[in-house]
Image (tube, rainbow, N blue to C red):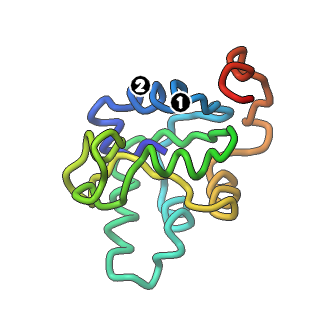
């Protein structure tokens, strides 16, 4: 997901480009303005933490771009591309390492496990909104 600060900074195209150039496939994408219920569901694992209300308010502060990404080891690869949650710890070359300074404005969210991905996808997408297709370059990306 490109979060509100990424959308406001005009980073959507850059992030999509990096995902596609790496060889990953976008099978779902939309623009949303996250409401209270959706924000609380998205961050429910942090509900008892002191920063929960800040997370909820942040994700509701502007439009976001949730995406569903597929590819071999997509979660691991995308997490490496995104970089550490705290941009001060993110490597140069990662999205956060290249474009972020503040942990509270870190541009993107990426699921950390297949279970999280399944849950988060269900928050933003119906099955009918996801596409099944083969990219023409897949035979050149994967052996």
Query: Badge 2 local density, few (<14 within 10 Å), some, or many (20+)?
Result: few
When the figure is inspected, residue 132 is found, relative to residue 54, above or below; the finding is: above
Discs 2/1, front: 1
Q: Which residue is mark 2?
A: 13
Name the one closer to the observer, 87 or 12: 87
Q: Tell me, for residue 32, which label it has, or none.
A: none
Task: Tell me what residue is drawn at x 51 percent, y 52 percent.
Answer: 110
Q: Residue furthest front?
A: 143
Task: Tell me what residue is drawn at x 47 percent, y 79 percent.
Answer: 47
Image position, residue 38 (x, y; %): 55, 59
When the figure is inspected, residue 141 is found, relative to residue 109, above or below; the finding is: above
The reply, left or right, for residue 138 in relation to residue 1 is right
Q: Quadrant of residue 2?
A: top left
The reply, left or right, for residue 77 in relation to residue 46 is right
Q: Earlier in the sequence, mark 2 or mark 1?
A: 2
Q: Quadrant of residue 89?
A: bottom left
Image position, residue 15 (x, y; %): 42, 33
When the figure is inspected, residue 43 is found, relative to residue 141, above or below; the finding is: below
Q: Quadrant of residue 88?
A: bottom left
Task: Tell me what residue is drawn at x 41 percent, y 41 percent.
Answer: 63
As helix, strand or loop, the secondary structure at mark 1 comes to: helix
Mark 2 in CB contact with mark 1 (< 8 angstroms)? no
Name the one closer to the observer, 39 or 45: 45
The total number of labels drawn is 2
C-alpha span from label 2 to label 1:
14 Å
Image position, residue 130 (x, y; %): 74, 36
Q: Tell me, for residue 22, which label it has, or none.
A: 1
Q: Residue furthest top?
A: 136
As helix, strand or loop, the secondary structure at mark 2 comes to: helix
Task: Tell me what residue is drawn at x 69 percent, y 54 percent.
Answer: 122
């Amino acid at each position: 997901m490109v979060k509100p600060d990424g959308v406001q900074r005009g980073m959507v195209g850059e992030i999509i480009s990096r995902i596609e150039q790496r060889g990953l496939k976008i099978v779902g994408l939309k623009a949303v303005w996250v409401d209270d219920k959706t924000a609380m569901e998205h961050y429910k694992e942090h509900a008892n933490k002191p920063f929960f209300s800040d997370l909820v308010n942040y994700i509701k502060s502007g439009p976001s771009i949730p995406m569903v990404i597929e590819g071999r080891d997509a979660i691991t690869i995308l997490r490496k591309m995104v970089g550490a949650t705290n941009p001060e710890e993110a490597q140069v070359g990662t999205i956060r390492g290249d474009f972020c300074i503040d942990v509270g404005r870190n541009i993107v969210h990426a699921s950390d496990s297949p279970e999280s991905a399944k849950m988060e996808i269900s928050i933003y997408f119906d099955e009918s909104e996801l596409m099944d297709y083969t990219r023409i370059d897949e035979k050149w990306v994967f052996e």
